[in-house]
């Protein structure tokens, strides 16, 4: 039933030319969840909820819970309808707000984070979610090859904090960045340790 619903969503968004997580990428993330036995996930960038449906279709096997954040109200409303149709209402917290202001207010600690929103602010999201992730658990940033120019400060931030990462080509023209949290605290904070000019330039991109 769920597979049929996902197929219908993909076909609808393909016809309407709405960008979404690819099947290849979705399968890779689901395999990670399965192997890691992740149970409490955070998604930044819900869109119309296809990526979230793909994630929770695997998380549901692990007594799962998902918190997902979307800024666009129309996308948020569409996501609500889709979550009802997929029967995942009880274990999904769907939030309609700017993640840049909301992440610090979240009280839970997560073992799996998927960042797929506002590519130029990926470094900000990583900085904000760091303390919300358990040690040795996983952070995934999407579209790091296709939108590498928009994420130019991200690699500098990773280098200054000595954060190890892998970039894995998943699709033909793109891939994901995989980070395992190995340290509790960051040595460099994006807002505190970068110049105002650098931050202003990053926001524009």
Image: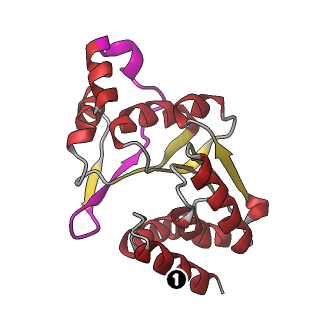
Q: Which residue is at a point 56% across and 35% down the rendered structure image?
A: 98
- The answer to whether residue 195 is seen in the rendering is no
Residue 158, image x and y in percent?
Answer: 29, 34
- Tell me which segment is drawn in magenta: 169-196
Q: Which element is circle 1 on?
A: helix
- The image position of residue 147, as x and y in percent, is 25, 48
Q: Nearer the viewer, residue 11 or 127?
A: 11
Coloration mode: secondary structure
Whether residue 179 is situated above or below residue 8 in the rendered picture: above
The image quadrant of residue 175 is bottom left
**Front one among 189 and 87:** 87
Name the spot of residue 63 as percent of width and height, x first.
71, 65
192 drawn magenta: yes
Q: On the rendered structure, is 6 left or right of 85?
A: left
- Residue in view at x 49 percent, y 34 percent: 130
The image quarter in which residue 66 lies: bottom right
Q: Is residue 65 magenta?
A: no
Position of 117 with respect to 154 (left or right) is: right
Q: Which residue is mark 1?
A: 7
Closer to the camera in the image, 153 or 50: 50
Quadrant of the drawing holding the C terminus: top left
Q: Position of residue 204 (x, y in %)?
A: 30, 28
Residue at the extreme right = 90
Q: Residue at x 68, y 51 (%)?
A: 94
Q: Give the vertical position of 150 relative to 68 (above or below).
A: above
């Amino acid at each position: 039933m769920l597979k049929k619903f996902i197929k219908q969503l993909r076909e609808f968004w393909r016809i309407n030319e709405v960008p979404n997580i690819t099947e290849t990428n979705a399968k890779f993330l689901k395999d990670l969840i399965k192997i890691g036995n992740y149970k409490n996930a955070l998604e930044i960038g819900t869109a119309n909820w296809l990526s979230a449906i793909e994630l929770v279709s695997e998380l549901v096997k692990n007594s799962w819970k998902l918190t997902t954040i979307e800024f666009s109200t129309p996308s948020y409303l569409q996501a609500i309808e889709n979550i009802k149709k997929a029967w995942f209402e009880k274990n999904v917290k769907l939030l309609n707000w700017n993640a840049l202001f909301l992440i610090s207010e979240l009280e839970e600690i997560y073992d799996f984070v998927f960042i797929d929103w506002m590519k130029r602010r990926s470094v900000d999201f990583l900085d904000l979610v760091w303390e919300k992730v358990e040690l040795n658990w996983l952070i995934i940033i999407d579209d790091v090859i296709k939108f590498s120019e928009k994420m130019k400060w991200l690699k500098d931030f990773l280098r200054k904090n000595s954060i190890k990462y892998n970039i894995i080509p998943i699709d033909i023209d793109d891939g994901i960045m995989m980070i395992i949290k190995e340290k509790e605290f960051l040595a460099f904070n994006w807002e505190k340790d970068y110049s105002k000019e650098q931050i202003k330039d990053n926001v524009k991109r």
